[in-house]
Amino acid sequence: MAEDLLQQLVNGVAWGGIYALIALGYTMVYGVLKLINFAHGEVYMVGAMTGYYAARSFGLAGAPSLLGLVATLAASMAVCALLAAIIERVAYRPLRSAPRLAPLITAIGVSLLLQNLGQLVFGADPKFFPPLLESRNVFEVGKLSVSNVQLAVLGTAILLMAALQWIVMRTRFGRAMRAVSFDAQAAALMGVPVDRVILGTFVLGAVLAAAAGVLVGLTNPKIDPLMGVLPGLKAFVAAVLGGIGNIPGAMVGGLLLGVIETFVSGYLSSTYRDAIAFVLLIAILLYKPTGLFGTTQTEKV
């Protein structure tokens, strides 16, 4: 029983790391722009698709290696960073001073556009991600086993989250991001390039989503152009659970959601796996709308 519990915990933490990477994009954009970027799930999808084609073009399907995984991650991050920059510049920046509902509707429109473009460009049929790592158990005690793929997913997620935290808290760009998040107008008066900071925030979030797309290909090889819809919504739930706009909160929210989903699937029924995220969303909005790490803010009217 204890071994089963630990196995579910390991599986949940590995899956939660992927949710956390996607949730960070939601929470950073909201923290800076007060915008829910519902197209973020589709950026994750493009990351997975780019990783698929990059791995095939690099010839990694028959020769899995850690170096191949790094190269695939780099290619996917570069494409998604460019995509995020285009989305921000074309779809969101012209609506910066519009009523808050306009960019929200635009985000939904961009999401639908990317879904349909994905089906047109990549094809509607599912594809199977090539094995970038040769799967083997590195730790095994009774029924408990930890594979090198799980360690790679969790290790990459932790490394990227730590790098993001360092960027936000220790670099000049991070200070500018926090200043824009606190008061964009005052930051602009102090010489902070607000447009570049917002663009950089979108790019950072897209890089993390791209990594999540590649990592999910390692654990769940079946990918398709509509794969971003449900994980994108669940990652949004994770961001709300941790406290939307709070970076450590998004990390913890993603990990918690992954663990809860895995336990529900393992001990109740896999039928409830997708529903539990939205049950959590309703509960958190009813009893703690600011999330686990969020703080109540007074808004002047």
Image (spheres, rainbow, N blue to C red):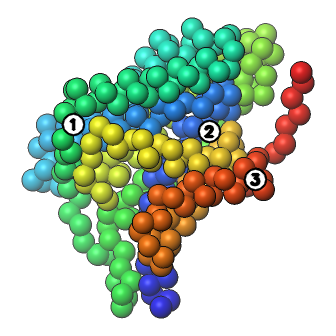
| Residue type marked 2 | Thr
Which tag, 2 or 1, sits closer to the chain's start? 2
183 or 238, which is in the foreground?
238
Q: Which residue has dot 1 on it?
A: 124
The image quarter in which residue 29 lies = top right
Identify the secondary structure beneath mark 1: loop
Is 202 placed above or below 68 here?
Answer: above
159 vs 171, left or right, is: left
Identify the secondary structure beneath mark 2: helix
Residue 286 disc label: 3
Which tag, 3 or 1, sits closer to the chain's start? 1
The image quarter in which residue 104 lies = top right
* Residue 69: x %, y % from top left: 27, 49
Q: Estimate the spatial distance between the alpha carbons at disc 2 and disc 3, rounded to whole Å.
A: 20 Å
Q: Which residue has dot 2 on it?
A: 27
| Residue type marked 3 | Leu
Is 180 placed above or below 4 here?
Answer: above
Which tag, 2 or 3, sits closer to the chain's start? 2
Identify the secondary structure beneath mark 3: helix
